[in-house]
Amino acid sequence: MDFSGVEAHFSLPRGTLSDGQALLEGEDIALEFTIGMLWQATPDTSFGFSARTGTEFNLEGTGTITNFPTLSASGLTQTTVTERIEVPITIPQSLSFGLAHQLSDALKLLAGATWAKWSDASALTVVSRENTPLAFPAEQPPEEQIQSWKDTWQWRVGAIWQVAPSWSLKAGYLFDESPVTIKTRSPLTPFDDYHQVSLGAQVRDVAGDWTVDMFVARVFYEGDISIDYRPTDPVQGQTAFRSEYDVVPWTAGLQFSRQF
């Protein structure tokens, strides 16, 4: 955390205050529901649909900030502050559509899309649960000051090649829109649109009735994931921050299943 806004507020030379580190920890339990339908249009083609209600979390835990500037009788000092906090998080409603078509005995094609109502969510805001907050705000900002996210679409295509009766190869591609725009990015949510390519395989009848699925996937983000925020009124203590993210996500999975 950069405290240059505090330096400006107290007319201190830049670099007087050391940067701080923030650690947020919280947990909650919530409930959501999913309903789906599958229609076998022809022997070779099927359509699927599912809807999720979404849910809301209110994570409660602690927030700790090191080197936090505090004003005392001896002047401005830096110390570690820990407060009880809460963070509301909205998991959006979503609708998913899918199509599967058996093109031949060996090749099956798949496609799908998911729409998510991320506009119901807003940038994550940490709120203190202390009677006299010191490091975190006492309440959520006014609704007109919250920059909401945008609704998103995710598009998917894939194929399954039945190489032999007991094993098959899989490949897939998806494009996922980010709910966060350049204006609503923050250090907690630096997301951008991304593409994902995946390869996998399935082996059946392993050690009897077991089936083994495995995959590896690689994500490619669009453009440059960076944030450069400059305060409009640094004298009021607003903080500037600049961050860059070098993200190269790889994902691998291994699943064992057995039908009884």
Image (cartoon, rainbow, N blue to C red):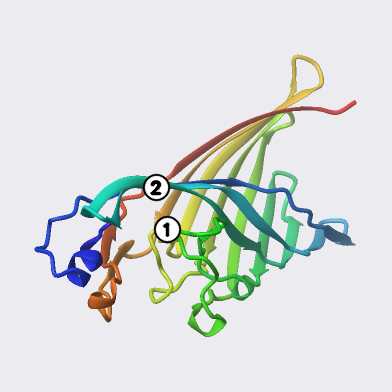
Residue 93 shows in this picture: yes
Residue 138, position in %: x, y? 52, 65
Residue in the image at 14% along x and 70% along y: 11
Q: Which residue is mark 2?
A: 81
Residue 248 shows in this picture: no
Residue 60, position in %: x, y? 61, 50
Residue in the image at 56% along x and 81% along y: 143
Name the image quarter holding the N terminus: bottom left
Q: Which residue is outermost to the bottom? A: 144
> Is 73 left or right of 183, judged from the image as shown?
left
Q: Amino acid at mark 2?
A: Val
Q: Amino acid at mark 1?
A: Leu
Residue in the image at 25% along x and 73% along y: 230
Residue 79, position in %: x, y? 30, 46
Disc 2 is placed on an element classified as: strand
Q: Which mark is residue 94?
A: none
Disc 1 is placed on an element classified as: loop
> Is 137 left or right of 120, judged from the image as shown?
left
> Is 192 left or right of 175, judged from the image as shown?
left
Residue in the image at 60% along x and 75% along y: 119
Marks 2 and 1 in Cβ contact (< 8 Å): yes
**Is residue 8 or residue 23 the one in the foreground?**
8
In the figure, residue 136 lies in which quadrant? bottom left
Q: Which residue is mark 1?
A: 134
Alpha-carbon span between mark 2 and mark 1: 8 Å
Answer few, some or many: residues within 10 Å of disc 1's Cα (few below 14, many 20 plus, some between 14 and 19).
some
Answer few, some or many: residues within 10 Å of disc 2's Cα (few below 14, many 20 plus, some between 14 and 19).
some
Labels 2 and 1: the sequence-earlier one: 2
103, above or below 167, in the image:
below
> Is 153 left or right of 243, judged from the image as shown?
right
